[in-house]
Amino acid sequence: MVLLLIVVPSALLTVFQLSSINQQEDAFETIYERQLKSVILSLNMYADDVVGQWASKVAYLWQDTKDGNAELVDFIEGNSQIQGAVLYAFSEKAGLSNPVVLGNVTSDIAAQVLDSCSASQNSISRLFTYLQSNYQKVISFSLAKEPESSVFVFAILNSQGDRWVGTLIVNTEKFLIDILAPRIQSTAQQDMAMAVKSSRNGSVLYANNKSTEFNDNDIHEKLWQLPNYSIYLKPLGNTTEALIKKRSRNNLSLLVAVDVLLLLGAILIYRNVRKQLHLAKIKADFVSNVSHEIRTPLALISMYAESLQLNRVRGEDKLQRCYLIIYREAKRLSGIVNNILNFSKMESGKRKFTFDAFDLNEIIRNVVARYQYEMQTNQVEFVLHIDKKIPQVWGDKEAIDEALVNLIDNAIKYSKDQKYVEIGTGAEGDKIWVEVKDHGIGIQRNEQNLIFDQFYRVTEGNLAQDTKGSGLGLNIVKNITNAHRGSITVQSEPGKGSVFRLCLPRAKEY
């Protein structure tokens, strides 16, 4: 359920984000193309401004003279891009008349200009309408017989209010190279490749990057004042498509990384929830088991104490037996409580150990001696294989005593009818070891690493299920061993018993 609550929203979010990424990339492509086209727009506006300034200058300098104007001639000659100018008187009825030719304009070119202007009389009439609104509009066209030349046409009102039509004949290539190319170069710099191509034959008149090829798939726009020519633009390094693909890959990579993190987070949460639920179950079992463990000795102590109080026990032997049972159960109860208290201290890091050199064999003999009652009543067989030559151990005697008691208790509890406990000691390198061996039910291989975890109990088999315990004994043994910088290992096979080896440091090492 936890995985579903996280994975399903994550999957839906991924689908939404993928759709969103596609929409964003389409929007990004549109915006990016608009930005590039705005560069072309700025160049068109610049060219338009230059032509507009020329037209305004001619209109300002033109006077109603048939012999021309010296300042106007100087202006034309001062701009090498302008071949010359032809000015016509204009009326709606008569059209164009009284041409005034200035500069290097041949009669053939003048005739072509007149023909083109006469064919566009309606457009020329609108130029005067714009002029009355203080807007100097310029129209342009190319000469059929002189494709290398372009003509700019504009309206003029002289000081007497007469209408004139001004035409500037411009060398197209010189206009592009001298006027537009420097602007292209400063605009493009090192980021873009730009070129001006003829729409008639596809020839490139100018390019700021000679190695770049341009085609109709690239971003391009016609020049307003030179409609037979177009400006082409291409980003250097990566194309627009490549930039969009790279951005898409980065977004997808980020999305995948987020999804992986969410999935890992879901897995971690799921595992943590499972662990917490398992721990809660173990704790509940622990409380139940400890309650049973405590209840049994308390019930026996209470029952025999009541019998003694009511003088129901007759005979010295029966009295001694009652005393022994009360003592044994009180000791058992004390052991359970001590285990819980010691575990609590270890968990909180408050348990203190007092280290000293001591004889491990002596500790073993003292522990075994305390099991005399079990030997008699439960027919427990103890076998000792003690190496008398082992050196002393460095550690806490009470803690090692407690560890041995836990190991022996488990050996007795998890043995069937044949309750056999074999204890041996020896030395290996810089460690002293003690082994506790039994002929009990054994432990499955997959559980051998788990038995040292807190609250964990083996439950396979009838004996394991019926045997009560807190699940703390082996965890306490491991904690004691770790505190002594030692180790605890187990060798076991189901149905054939177990061997626990506890390794401790020599005293001389300290």
Image: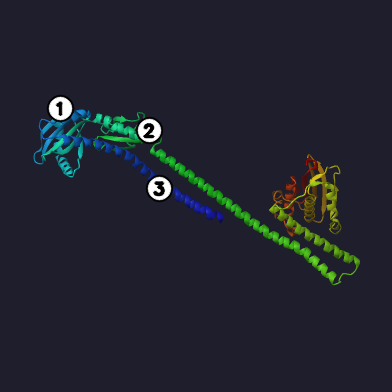
Relative to 173, 284 lies left or right: right
Q: Position of residue 468 (x, y in %)?
A: 74, 59
Mark 1 and mark 3 residues within 8 Å of each other at the beta carbon = no
In the rendered image, the vertical position of residue 186 relative to residue 478, given as above or below = above
Residue at 78%, 66% (x, y): give it. 299
Name the front one of labels 1 and 2.
2
Label 1 neighbour load within 10 Å: few <14, some 14-19, many 20+: few
Name the front one of labels 1 and 3.
1
Q: Residue furthest left?
A: 94
Relative to 407, 313 lies left or right: right
Q: Position of residue 87 (x, y in %)?
A: 14, 34
Q: CA distance from mark 3 to mark 2?
A: 30 Å
Q: CA distance from mark 1 to mark 3?
A: 58 Å
Q: CA distance from mark 1 to mark 2?
A: 42 Å
Relative to 47, 343 lies left or right: right
Precedes in sequence: disc 3 or disc 2: 3
Dot 1 lies on which element?
loop
Label 3 neighbour load within 10 Å: few <14, some 14-19, many 20+: few
Identify the residue under disc 2.
190
Question: Does residue 143 appear anywhere in the picture?
Answer: no
Q: Position of residue 66 (x, y in %)?
A: 10, 32
Quarter assignment of residue 52: top left
Dot 3 lies on which element?
helix
Q: Which mark is residue 297?
A: none
Identify the residue under disc 3.
23
What's under tag 2, amino acid-wise? Gln
Label 2 neighbour load within 10 Å: few <14, some 14-19, many 20+: few
Residue in the foreground of this view, choosing between 48 and 24: 48
Q: Which mark is residue 106?
A: 1
Question: Does residue 426 appear anywhere in the picture?
Answer: yes
